Amino acid sequence: MSNPAQTVHILGLGSIGSLIAHCLRSLPSPPPVNLLIHRKTLYDELAQAHWTLGLRVGEDGPLQKRGGFGAELVPATTSREPIQNLIVAVKASATVAALKPIQHRLGPTTNICLFQNGMGQVEDLNSCMFPDRKSRPTYMFGIMRHGVYLRSSTEAVLSGLSGSASIGIMDEDGEACRSSRQDECRGPGSPRELLDVLLRSPILRCEHLEWKELYENQLFKLAANCVLNPLTAIYDVRNGEIKSNLDMRPLLQNVLEEVSLVLQRLPGIRELPDDQKSRFSASALERLTMDTIEQTARNSSSMREDIRKGRMTEIEYINGWILRRARELQIDCPANRDLMERVLDISRSTRRG
Ligand SMILES: CC(C)(CO)C(=O)C(=O)O
């Protein structure tokens, strides 16, 4: 990917966006990486850091700096250059607002890879920005299982190397690139080319999953986020403390029991044979969540960080998404509702204060 048309644009420089930007610029013969920045203060801070981003592996690991980034201040940019590859790492709730100013640069040949927590963003993008099927970009999804947080706007901390990521490609029907379209999927500027670049990073440890498997993994990650994110935000603790805190265990189990009831009734899951559906049982989700807690024990979750920094959280795309599906399926989910309300209350008071 040395052709400037193959530039990877990154929208959102929180912990995930910074990690991906850093990993891409760490590759041998790295692709051009262009940072699309909304906040003038962040743009100025990066300019002061001579357009470098730092990453520490482990809290006390050495600071590894990477540079050579392009950058555009999005609201002010006059560029009309079409965007071929876009990685979206803004908060789920900010997706449409963040993409609107660059809408004229996106089209059916754009590859948009969403590296976000939560579910429902593609539905939002399609209804608000791409109502016409023919104008829609190719969507890819990334699931991030790394524990990573920002120590400052130009320094990310990866809590360890035990995390991993998964990526998959949807076609316009919501299915993976079919085998008959593999060539189309692999050509220059194709989603597969973007995927191959991401797969090369030894730190990201990305695996490629077919759509069905990716969708299931999104739901597993969502289940873990439904407990980990709100609990760490409400109790103001690091991820690992959930495991040792016995008070939180019953709450965790109640939330996952409701999540399990909802997930098992979703299209694509409810048709599965019983032995495969059992991967969505409450006890299976609890085991997966415990694994995530262990792998990211030293991390401060994104929701806890949002609350501490007085920013909006993604709760409506995590527990909120479960509650919307539950309403359609007429399943009562009091534990999820309660967690969401508590996070919204704390968020309102910290954002006011
Ligand atoms: C995996 C986990 C829970 C890591 O903290 C995360 O996704 C987050 O913080 O949002």
Image: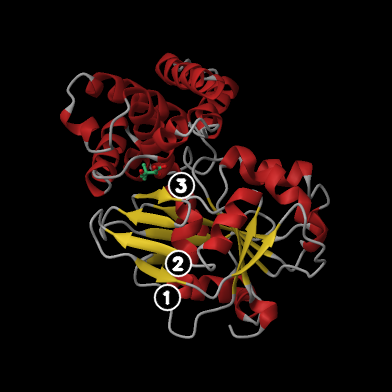
Mark 2–mark 1 CB contact (< 8 Å): yes
Mark 1–mark 3 CB contact (< 8 Å): no
Q: Is residue 146 above or below residue 2?
A: above
Residue 264 visible (yes or no): no
Spatial separation of the CA atoms under disc 2 and disc 3: 24 Å
> Residue at 42% across / 40% down in the picture?
302
> Residue at 83% across / 51% down in the picture?
132
Classify mark 3 as within 8 Å of ligand 1 or not, answering yes or no. no
Q: Report which residue position mark 1 lands on.
A: 26
Q: How many marks?
A: 3
Expressed as whole percent of the image width and height from the top left, the position of residue 104 reads 83, 59
> Residue at 74% across / 46% down in the picture?
126
In terms of image quadrants, where is residue 92? top right
Residue mark closest to the camera, 2 vs 3: 2
In which quadrant will I find the N terminus? bottom right
Q: Earlier in the sequence, mark 2 or mark 3?
A: 2
Question: Of 94 and 70, which appears nearest the observer?
Answer: 70
Spatial separation of the CA atoms under disc 1 and disc 3: 27 Å
